[in-house]
Image: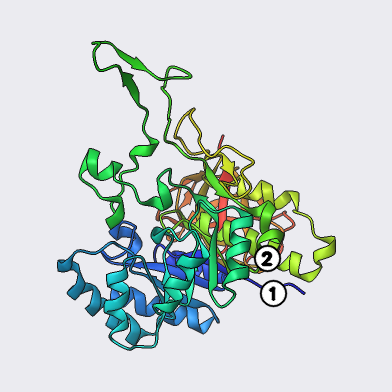
Amino acid sequence: MPRRPELLSPAGDLEKLQTAVRFGADAVYAGAENFSLRADSNSFTLQELGAGIRFAHEHGCKFYLALNIYAFDHDLAKLLAYFQEAVNLGIDAVIVSDPGVLRTLQELGTGVKFHISTQANTTNSAAVKFWLNNGATRIVAARELTLEQLREIKQKVPAAELEVFIHGALCIAYSGRCLLSRYLTGRSANRGECAQPCRWAYTLRETNRPDVYTAEEDQHGLYILNSRDLCLLEHLPELITAGIDSCKIEGRMKSAFYTAMTTKVYRQAIDTYLANPAQYSVAQEWRANLAKISHRPYTDGLFSLGEPTEYPQDSAYIKDYDFVGIAENYDVAAKRLTVSGRNQFRSGDELEILDSKISPIQKVKVGQMRKSDGEIISVAHNSYQVTLDLAGQAVAPISKHSILYRKRT
């Protein structure tokens, strides 16, 4: 029987952390103020960190803290202080890139495990041994590795935990170590401030001629640095049999809808495979559901060397569905669903319900809507709390915190 890998989901804030846990994550990872590679709005204060760790541990889920910036000297004292507070709150591991940060944090002797970030671009077994010899327990593999390369590393260094990204945005730069954003905007990608200039359209000018030429496939230009999004759903059996210890979903800056859907789909896929490897196949509904979240065209990256990673047509997301609300309560007898609104929806709209407690996705039609003060309305907006009349519809019980979304028209 293949060994069960960890499913590791992103936690951009406390709500997304709770969503990941409810929808089946074995572990979550979150950023720390200015010390991780995501914007401040997707990082945790110490108060939020404590609440998140408690929630995760109460549900049998591990919590990993990202401190993976490449630090300057003036960062170290604040980073060290934050880390000590995080240790006191109960983090299970810390994710680092910088050897100096690794050594500085180790000197505290906290006993917390160290994971080496993909930013360290570890691409071979010798580098994995180096990190293990310097106190790390897990390596987040560089995204440039193929299946065969991952398998070889695991075979040569079985003592190392190997973590692999299985879904989410890809960076055109080598393991994300990009200078383009800093050069063009002053915002460093290696300090959590990337402006994503790889998503922009570019023109071409020959040095000795005044004309500017647009390198284009259409009137919008050619997005020569723009990458597709990673999706390794089809390759989960190969990852599991290769001995990969942790399957990681990218997306701390994505919505709770994204977190819920990706976590649920990969949870179902991993569990289904492990229950009966010989009879496993990828369910069409899993593919369809991953297509509902905001994404760029999918690729398997360099994993099999079989698909292109670039997408030169445009840099826009495919957004066919809108995340519109979260279920707060469902009165089974009265068939009334109370929803906390996150986006606009109307009476008569068909909503889909992503529930952590049941496998099928339900569809309901919005009947009469009332605000919390009893006012009947036809359109709900972000921050509205509304009660939906679902009378006359065959609706199974709807769990609190279920995600509601609708197809765009």
Q: Is residue 172 visible?
A: yes
**Badge 1 density bin: few <14, some 14–19, many ≥20, Cα 10 Å:** few
Q: Secondary structure at mark 2?
A: helix
Question: Where does residue 98 sit, x and y in percent of width and height?
Answer: 31, 66
Amino acid identity at mark 1: Arg
* 62 relative to 12, above or below: below
Q: Amino acid at mark 2?
A: Ile
Residue at 23% across / 47% down in the picture? Answer: 187
The residue lying furthest to the right in this view is 279
- Sooner in the amino-acid sequence: mark 2 or mark 1: 1
Does the CB distance between marks 2 and 1 fall below 8 Å?
A: yes
Q: Which residue is mark 2?
A: 240
For the point 40% across and 20% down, the residue is 215
Q: Which residue is nearer to you in this view: 257 or 45?
A: 45
Horizontal and vertical percent position of residue 242: 67, 65
Is residue 282 shown above or below 18?
A: above
The coloring applied to the image is: rainbow
Q: Secondary structure at mark 1?
A: loop
Which picture quadrant has residue 297? Answer: top right
Q: Measured along the vertical axis of the image, is residue 317 above or below residue 157?
A: above
The disc placed on residue 3 is 1
Question: Residue 233 placed where, x, y %?
Answer: 65, 54
Q: Tell me what residue is drawn at x 60 percent, y 50 percent.
A: 303
For residue 261, side relative to residue 188 (left or right): right
Q: Is residue 160 left or right of residue 289?
A: left
Say few, some or many: other residues with alpha carbon within 10 Å of mark 2 (under 14 / 14 to 19 / 20 or more). Answer: some
Residue at 30% x, 51% y is 189
Horizontal side of residue 34 vs 271, given as left or right: left
Q: Which mark is residue 361?
A: none
Q: How many marks?
A: 2
Between the residue at mark 2 and the residue at mark 1, the CA separation in whole angstroms equals 7 Å
Residue 89 on image: x %, y %: 35, 84
